Image (spheres, rainbow, N blue to C red):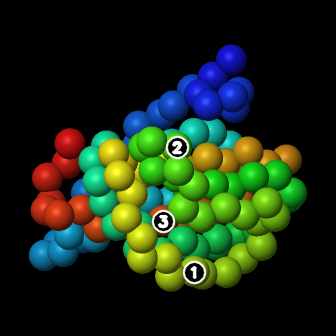
Amino acid sequence: MGWGGFPYELVDLYSPTEPGSCVHGVQVDSNGVWRVSRRGCELHSVKILVQGSSGLFDVMTGTGRSLFRQPSCFTGSWPVGCFAEEGLIMVVHCGTPPSVQVSFRETDDRIV
């Protein structure tokens, strides 16, 4: 089937930090299940740049706990500021996928 009951395999995305910062930023614009961090981190903000059709956009921890969920993907920006244990996973499952940007902070600038 796929990951977590979704028809997609888990895909790792790697993003370097901004110079002199511990903040990472990742942008996706297609359906899928994306692991953007493999270790504990702080989900800083979620921004939907281009809206998608109805479906599901979910940001969850590596353990599957939902941190931010949108059943309809309208544009906007949300400061979140919560901890994600064991990594950070984004799920995009929409008729027309949105363009979504997530920023998060790890404790240092290593890419694991």
Amino acid, disc 2: Gly
Residue on which the image places disc 2: 64
Q: In front: 68, or 105?
A: 68
The disc, 1 or 3, on the residue closer to the chain's N-terminal end is 1
Q: Residue furthest top?
A: 1
Tell me the tag on residue 102: 3
Classify mark 1: helix, strand or loop: strand
Q: Residue at x 60, y 81 (%)?
A: 77
Whether residue 29 is visible here, answered yes or no, is: no
Question: Residue 112 appears at what percent x and percent y?
Answer: 20, 42
Question: Residue 40 appears at what percent x and percent y?
Answer: 29, 53
Nearer the observer, disc 1 or disc 3?
1
Q: Is residue 80 above or below residue 16?
A: below
The N terminus lies in quadrant: top right
- Disc 1 vs disc 3: Cβ atoms closer than 8 Å? no
Classify mark 2: helix, strand or loop: loop
Q: Residue at x 39, y 57 (%)?
A: 84
Amino acid, disc 1: Trp
Nearer the observer, disc 2 or disc 3?
2
Residue on which the image places disc 1: 78
Q: Residues within 10 Å of mark 2 (few under 14, many from 20)?
A: some
Q: Is residue 13 above or below residue 70?
A: above
Whether residue 107 is visible here, answered yes or no, is: yes
Q: Is residue 48 left or right of residue 10?
A: right
The disc, 2 or 3, on the residue closer to the chain's N-terminal end is 2
Q: Is residue 80 left or right of residue 75?
A: left
Residues under labels 1 and 3: Cα distance?
10 Å
Residues under labels 2 and 3: Cα distance?
17 Å
Q: Residues within 10 Å of mark 3 (few under 14, many from 20)?
A: many
Q: Quadrant of residue 75?
A: bottom right
Question: Residue 30 appears at what percent x and percent y?
Answer: 65, 47
Classify mark 3: helix, strand or loop: strand
